[in-house]
Amino acid sequence: MKTAAILSKLWQSIIRHPQAVIQNGQPWINRLLILVAVILIYGWAWQGLQVDLELLKTSWPYIVDFIRRLWPPNLEVLDVAIKALIETIQMSLWGTTIGAVLSLPIAVASASNLAPPWLRLSANFVQNVVRSVPSIVLGLLFVAATGLGAPAGTLALGIYTIGYLAKFYQEAIESVDPRSLESLQISGASWLQIAQYGILPQVLPLGLGYTLYMFEYNIRAASVLGVVGAGGIGFELASYIRSFEYPKATTMMLVLLVVVTAIDGLSSKLRDRLEDS
Amino acid sequence: MMTIELQNLETQTFSSLNRPILQGINCQIGRGEFVALLGLNGAGKSTLLRSLLGLVPLRQGEIRINGTTIHAPKNGSKTSRRDVGMLFQGGGLIRQLSALENVLCGRLGAMSTWQTLWGFPKSDRRLALDLLTRLGLKDQAYQKTSLLSGGQQQRVAIARALIQSPQILLADEPIAALDAIAAKQVMEILSALHREQGMTIITVLHDLAIAASYAQRAIILDGGKIVYDGKSQNLPATLA
């Protein structure tokens, strides 16, 4: 009864003065309000999913059967897997590089400490447009333009990369110490000198770290692009699954797992070294 | 003889203060003076210092340094800025560059973009190393500045300002966040530059006792106006 009274009082106060409760209320009331809000948001999202738990229960044997058919891997296609994987790495390398080169001017144009507001607005809009196009749609677009294979995937990765690297580079540029730039400006340095001696040294370690992360991410993204015929290991993986050759598909996934793990470890170490420098 | 002349300076209204940061500043600072700028936070000390570099747009008034009028950023005169060196709180250094490279950055204004694209000439590198040696940082010359202590960073910043051969050195809270020994070292260097080279020093300080020990003159700001302009000796007693 007491709890109901507290909740009722709380509800009334939210209805009447929501702002006052957040600003002046007791800390525990604020926390409770946040908890209730979080629960409501998750509840809203859950009902939108319309998850049928009964169906999940009955479909469980099918999931188990699918996994069972994946094992053991068919190592006869190991050479095909390695060849496709090399192509995926090549796609990621070029895709990331194209994306990084195109991201740089967009990031400079988006940075609040470098660009005028009108340019920032336009550059941020370009970023949002690129980011809102799914990689698979880009894959389909470039397959239509250049045909099936790695060139389509590479171009798709290049454009997809812009959406993320431009934002990362922008944030790296915006985190540059403004006083250090002002000190160069005071000494009479030109804009290009400020960029070379002030901005670049501060942005480079962070920017290279983000680029390495994107390279690693693009190897995984390239696998998805293969599903729409844009080359790489994903192309082989999708082909084997479509033709029900699950053990061969497993070999592809295992090779991908080994390489992704190795590159993740390597790029983590490189990023740590860059951050320390 | 007069180096700096400020006439009826007034900046734009600052929204959070609801008044101009500087209002009606009139003052003259002669060549070779050591001046301490004092005042509470928001009094306008740093803004006054920055306005001497033409970094603050003015609503009215005029700043003349060695007879040259200083304008707000768009028309900033490069020549007069090279006469003036600036020390920022914390140094304002590029932390990823070595101490030597930071000092060399002070030469950027004297060289074209093309000249500095591939680095600095040997003569400049020698000069920078010489300055660092004089400031007791020879062994740290090739170290990244992020690895140096606060006091060492501030000395690198002094060397960077000195490589411009300035006649006037402005310092915005140069000893803030430094320990007592490092703060004393920095103030002794400023004092030596003033004493031995006749350099005009204008520094923002918070410590009245330090201001009284090193500066000849103190300017105290309050609410964007000068409320005291006189000798810095016995300053605590004067304010009491």
Image: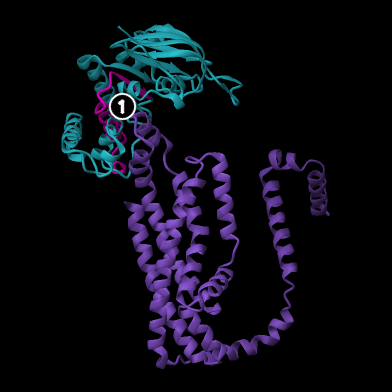
Residue placed under numbered mark 1 in the picture: B183
Taking A55 as reference, is B239 above or below it? above
Q: Identify the chain of the residue marked 1, using the numbered disc in the image.
A: B
**Which residue is drawn at the image coordinates 26% and 18% (left, top)?**
B191
Q: Position of residue B186 (x, y in %)?
A: 28, 26
Q: Is residue A15 found inside the magenta-colored segment of the image?
A: no
* Quadrant of the snapshot with the N terminus of chain A: bottom right
Q: Position of residue B157 (x, y in %)?
A: 30, 31
Mark 1 crowdedness (10 Å alpha carbons): few <14, some 14-19, many ≥20: some
Taking A265 as reference, is B61 above or below it? above
Residue at disc 1, secondary structure = helix
Nearer to us in this view, A218 or B192: A218
Q: Is A244 situated left or right of B94 in this image? A: right
Task: Provide the residue span drawn in magenta.
Answer: B145-172
- Give the chain ID for the purple colour: A
- Decide if residue B55 is in sight here: no
The furthest residue to the front: A145
Q: Chain B colour?
A: cyan
- Name the quadrant containing residue B194: top left
**Residue flagged by tag 1: what amino acid is it?**
Ala
Q: Is A192 situated left or right of A71 in this image? A: left
Q: Position of residue A240 (x, y in %)?
A: 52, 88
Q: Position of residue A116 (x, y in %)?
A: 53, 39
